[in-house]
Amino acid sequence: MKLKELQSYLQQVEGFDDPKVHLEQYVTSGHIASHMLYTMSQTFDDIANNIVADFGCGCGVLSIGSAMLDAGQVFSFDVDSDALEICQSNVDDFDVTSTVELISCDLMQSSTMLDYLTERRYIDTVVMNPPFGTKNNKGIDMYFLQKAISIANNAVYSLHKTSTRSHVIKKAEEMNCTVEVLAELRYDLPKTYKFHKKQSLDVQVDFIRCQPNR
């Protein structure tokens, strides 16, 4: 599948009906998601026939894209039942139900399923657009990253605010990872919540790859 075709498909994924500010719910655009996934697939071969986990899957754009790029299996984790309901609807619409399995899970707490996958070293690749921790739960992005690194056999792909680059790299290296900033992207954040004063806001984000040194 070509990049433009993947982007066209992912732009059709339905977003949140009523996004929750305390969970920092924003849709990952089809443009950003397709470029992330295409790089993972074509440059590093970290999707096809891999077992992929999508942390904080939301509406499922990264999960669906991974399935469309021939992931062997995708486990999609989210704490919000409303988001998982939308995600399931999107998965059904894109006919990838045989590949994508949705899991209700709070990554901040112990989870039987997550513990099981971790213990058996089952997950090859983790992809995520974690909460940045700017409004609530300061440091949650690093917690997501730590969890992802602990579970992934091959690599973790994640988005983080460019302004936090040095901190993210330092923490990831302390987790015994080789870190690479693959791209600096412009995250076009549409007006989503009442406290947003502008119709849209450009946020500079880093697309990073962490490879655990095991």
Image (spheres, rainbow, N blue to C red):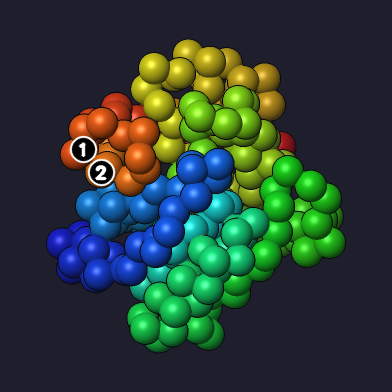
Residue 137 in the image: x percent, y percent?
62, 31
Cβ–Cβ under 8 Å for marks 1 and 2: yes
Residue at the spot 60% in from the left edge and 59% down from the top edge: 80
Q: Is residue 198 left or right of residue 133?
A: left
Q: Locate the C terminus by quadrant.
A: top right
Residue 121 in the image: x percent, y percent?
75, 56
* The one of 113 and 109 positioned closer to us in this rendering: 109
Q: Is residue 169 above or below residue 35?
A: above
- Label placed on residue 190: 2
Going by the numbered disc 1, the residue's amino acid type is: Ser
Going by the numbered disc 2, the residue's amino acid type is: Pro
Instruction: List the residue tagged with mark 1.
Output: 200
Q: Is residue 82 left or right of residue 161?
A: right
Residue found at the far front of this picture: 194
Q: Locate the N terminus by quadrant.
A: bottom left
Which quadrant holds residue 181? Answer: top left
Q: Is residue 18 above or below residue 69?
A: above
Which quadrant holds residue 117? Answer: bottom right
- Label placed on residue 164: none
* The one of 15 and 123 positioned closer to us in this rendering: 15
Q: Is residue 9 left or right of residue 100?
A: left
Residue 155 in the image: x percent, y percent?
55, 45
Residue found at the far left of this picture: 4
Estimate the spatial distance between the alpha carbons at disc 1 and disc 2, rounded to whole Å.
Answer: 4 Å
Residue at the spot 18% in from the left edge and 66% down from the top edge: 8
Residue at the spot 55% in from the left edge and 41% down from the top edge: 22
Residue 73 in the image: x percent, y percent?
56, 72
As helix, strand or loop, the secondary structure at mark 1 comes to strand
Residue at the spot 33% in from the left edge and 46% down from the top edge: 192
Q: Is residue 5 left or right of residue 192?
A: left
